[in-house]
Amino acid sequence: MSRHDSDIGETGRESEDAEIDLREYLGIIADGWRWILLAVICGLILATYFAWKQAPTYQATSLMRVEQSQNMAPAAFMQQQARSAGGAVQAVTAEAAIVHSRSVVGAAVDAENLQVRVHPFYFPVIGEPLSRLLSAISAGEWRVPGLSSYAWGNASANVTQIKLPPEQDSADFKLISRGDGRYQLLEPNGEKVLQGQVGKTASGVAPDIGPIKIFVESLNAASGTEFGVSYVSKATAIASVQARLQVKEQPQGSGLLDLTLSASSPKEAERQLNAVMSSYLQLSVEQQSQQAQQRLGFLKKQLPKLKEQRDQAQAKLASYQSKTGTLDLSSQANAVLQQLTNLDQQLAQVSINRQELLQEYTPKHPLVKAANDKRSTLEARRDKLQQQLKTLPKSESKLLELRRDTEVSDQLYTTLLNTSQGLQVSKAGITGVTHIIDSAYAPGGKVSPKRTSIMLIGLLAGGILGVLAVLLVALLRSALEDPDVMESKYGLPVYATIPLSDVETHRKLGDPLLATQAPDDTAVESLRALRTSLQFAMMEEGTRFVAITGPTPACGKSFVSANLGALLAHSGNRVLVVDGDMRRGLLYKAMGLKQSPGLSDVLSGSAGVAEVVQSTEVEYLDVLTTGKRPPNPSELLMSGRLHALKTELETQYDYVLFDLPPLLNVTDASLIAQHATATFLVVRSHHSTGHEVEQSIKRMDRDGLKLNGAIFNGLEITRMRYGYSKYRYYGYKY
């Protein structure tokens, strides 16, 4: 064979092994379908529990637009010119932070009494999810006899106001429904505080708190249902609203603020979000109005001074003109005068604006720095023009200076007077920089929990965990499951693979043997194959002495011995089955015979073979039971009487089957196997381990004995791991 052909062969074998391994795993999964189904059911139950345990959450949304304010003249105009596009984005981000601030949220908490919390008392563990499930099934009231204090569905209480003494910032109470809109308020220790009626303010005195007032707007619950009522601190209420409130600019750079707030009901979400927006708008208007008032006050202080400066300048000009008789300037002087007047007006306006800015900002603020830079630039230009005045005649230079002072003072006074009047109008029309585009709206559908998704995830997780658990157990299991392992790993040829028999499983002690009771059973068919193998393998022998043992108890060696003996007898052979386990042998019970006399009596010399052999209902099949339990079975087997027994049986039977004790428990099996023509090891599926088989082989090798083969017992052919492949023929009927 060429190397190419060899490579192809090896590749083919690897592919076949891979296919077998895949089918092996699929078979393991199919065999463990009950455990996987149980895991799926448990996963679904747990997922359903957690899905219904979570309180439903609804979300309200709203939209606001942030605009740049232009009614705070004159400083606002300067700010508008100084801001860049990035500054506008920062302004929107700042407004979003203000909406989320403690000042705004705290005002909403006060306006809507959000410090009041109410929740029904549920039965421990299962009460809360069960109550929500029952509420979803029916809108009526649910009651459980003997457990009327718990809420079982559709129970609700709406407490809109609680007033405590000023020194108390939080308190807890218990509210009990008394039917017909009546209720009773207790302290946590059971002390009665007050009794009230729905829709009316009730007053009372709490021993540990002091005088309180409470207003219950609605109460829908059966009589005796209990609710927990809490008045939390303002800081706690603010933190709760902030945690549920989100403010984002959508889309980025649009100046539109998208507000969302979650709550336990659509109505509650809308109410709280509208309260936050109203609080924010009110705060914004108050801040704008306060700024306008500050600037207006500043201008009112400056106007009398400017008026006085204007009057003085006009008087000086009139006096100089009257004294000198000079009434007009040359064209050159008029040009210089016009430029200086404009610069002086700008400098005066910048100075006033700078003083306004310093009332709100520090000297290091960018707006203040911009005003300083602009003033420095104007002063430099003014100084340059003033140098030109030195070239004019003295009388003309003096007149120019007086006219300049008069015009600057007059224009500055007029400008600030107009500004003051404009601020008064602007103050009356302040609406804030933000406008509500969409008021709060909460759709009817809840945003969480997604119960269907949670249950599907639980279903899937349960299935995955179930499959992993089945595979893990199979990988960790040391018990043998595949008959092929006996030959491939331990070198023992498997003479028979006996399927698990339902008839034998339900067979009682003393009932007919499986080979007689159900001759068409698949296990019996496998034993027939073993019988055929023995007959062909031992054709030239005289009496065939066959020893059947197992690594440990409960491998099924007695079942194999008895039924194999019956099948050999059915074919016309004289067969004797010897129960060689004188310590714990129970073959006599399985076949409905007497325990003694038996083998121990023969080996001890107290009875002969003819006296102890018992016939059975199967023709040609005899049984030699254990006899009395001897104190020294090993010593009896080591005596010469065992060889004499074998010699005597050779003349009477065609087959002698020894049902031996377990190999790994006692040495009796090795002592009897020395006289056997062939020895077989019975290995039970899902019971015997590879280590036990390995130790059994070593034990026999140590004693100079040989195991001729193995009998694989108890194979579950209904298991998908084997049922669809090479062991399918065990299900054949004829």
Image (cartoon, rainbow, N blue to C red):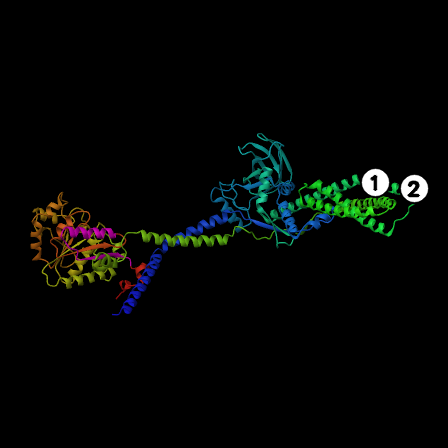
- Residue at image x 82%, y 50%? 336
Queried whether the magenta region covers residue 706, the answer comes back as: yes
Q: What residue type is labelled 1?
A: Gln
- Horizontal side of 298 relative to 18 (left or right) equals right
Name the residue that disc number 2 marks.
Answer: 323
Name the residue that disc number 1 marks.
Answer: 309
- Quadrant of the frame with the N terminus: bottom left
How many numbered dots are placed on residues in this image? Answer: 2
Q: Give the range drawn in magenta.
A: 688-716
- Horizontal side of 146 relative to 329 (left or right) equals left
Q: What element carries label 1?
A: helix
Instruction: Find residue 172 and report its image quarter.
Output: top right
Q: Which amino acid does label 2 sit on?
A: Lys
Queried whether the magenta region covers residue 180, the answer comes back as: no
Against 121, residue 58 (above or below) is below
Rendered location of residue 652, percent (x, y)? 8, 57
- Residue at image x 77%, y 48%? 384
User: Which of the two discs, 2 and 1, labels the residue nearer the N terminus?
Assistant: 1
Quick one: which residue is furthest to the top in this view?
207
In space, the residues marked 2 and 1 are separated at their CA atoms by 21 Å
- Horizontal side of 27 relative to 272 (left or right) equals left
Instruction: Find residue 171 and report its image quarter.
Output: top right
